[in-house]
């Protein structure tokens, strides 16, 4: 007798265990049950939250064996190693110049379009707006300029403070159009909607 298989009702993809199916279903529902207690950012996978937490703790477990520089994710280390190998995978279609990261190519392409770009000097990530860069930089510096007047807890972005304040006020701005039930978080409403669609939590 073969192993039991678990099928996604949404796309018919089959999995060998129920936990893998549960993780997959979140790609359809948009559910993000893992929330950072530092900034309020939510994730669909526990491993994604673990990686994100390093932006607050400063942990950098991936070290370059060429120069000793450390990184928070294995993907950042992979990109960094191209500096030593000289590998350049990203080529500009306008002039043929090649770069070792997609973000550096994006920066370069702005020289052809004349657009303003803003690059994080810590990790090389590129943003189209200065305010977006400022918010991102706080993940490196740990700065939390938004303080709750009720309990003095601080946050790095204003949207996280707004979400937190609802725990004091009891505000529930997200309402279900099916039954009228209200929620303080949009992610909670997303989970609730499964009751009506028949996609209950596995």
Image (cartoon, helix red, strand yellow):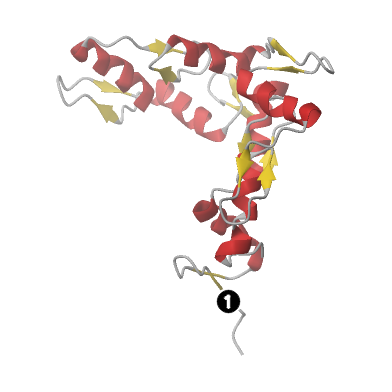
Q: Nearer the viewer, residue 98 or 25?
A: 25
**Horizontal placement of 128 versus 66: left or right?**
left
Q: Quadrant of residue 19?
A: bottom right
Q: Quadrant of residue 186?
A: top right
**Horizontal placement of 131 versus 53: left or right?**
left
Residue 61 visible? The answer is no
Q: Nearer the viewer, residue 25 or 170?
A: 170
- Label 1: which residue? 5
Tell me the residue at 23%/11% (across/down): 111
State the residue lying farthest toward the front: 180
Is disc 1 placed on a helix, strand or loop? loop
Give percent across and percent down for residue 35: 69, 37
Tell me the residue at 58%/19% (across/down): 69
Q: How many marks can you see?
A: 1
Q: Work out whether 19 lies above or below 88.
A: below
**Horizontal placement of 96 versus 88: left or right?**
left
Q: Residues within 10 Å of mark 1 (few under 14, many from 20)?
A: few
Give percent across and percent down for residue 45: 62, 46
Quarter of the picture holding the C terminus? bottom right
Q: Work out whether 146 lies above or below 185.
A: above
Q: Nearer the viewer, residue 189 or 172?
A: 172
State the residue lying farthest toward the bottom: 1
Q: Work out whether 122 lies above or below 185.
A: above
Tell me the residue at 17%/26% (across/down): 93
Residue 64 visible? The answer is yes
Q: Nearer the viewer, residue 144 or 93?
A: 144
Tell me the residue at 56%/25% (across/down): 64
Give percent across and percent down for residue 169: 77, 28
Give percent across and percent down for residue 178: 57, 56
Quarter of the picture holding the N terminus? bottom right
């Amino acid at each position: 007798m073969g192993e039991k298989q678990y099928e996604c009702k949404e796309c018919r993809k089959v999995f060998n265990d129920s936990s893998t199916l549960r993780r997959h279903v979140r790609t359809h529902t948009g559910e993000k049950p893992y929330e950072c207690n530092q900034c309020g950012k939510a994730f669909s996978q526990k491993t994604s939250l673990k990686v994100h937490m390093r932006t607050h703790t400063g942990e950098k477990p991936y070290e370059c064996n060429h120069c000793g520089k450390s990184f928070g994710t294995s993907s950042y280390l992979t990109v960094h190693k191209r500096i030593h190998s000289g590998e350049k995978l990203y080529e500009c279609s306008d002039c043929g110049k090649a770069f070792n990261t997609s973000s550096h190519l994006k920066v370069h392409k702005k020289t052809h379009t004349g657009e303003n770009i803003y690059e994080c000097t810590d990790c090389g990530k590129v943003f189209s707006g200065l305010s977006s860069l400022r918010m991102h930089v706080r993940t490196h510096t740990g700065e939390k300029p938004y303080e709750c007047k009720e309990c003095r807890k601080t946050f790095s972005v204003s949207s996280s403070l707004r979400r937190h304040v609802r725990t004091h006020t009891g505000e529930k701005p997200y309402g279900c159009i099916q039954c009228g039930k209200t929620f303080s978080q949009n992610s909670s409403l997303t989970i609730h909607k499964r009751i009506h669609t028949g996609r209950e939590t596995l």
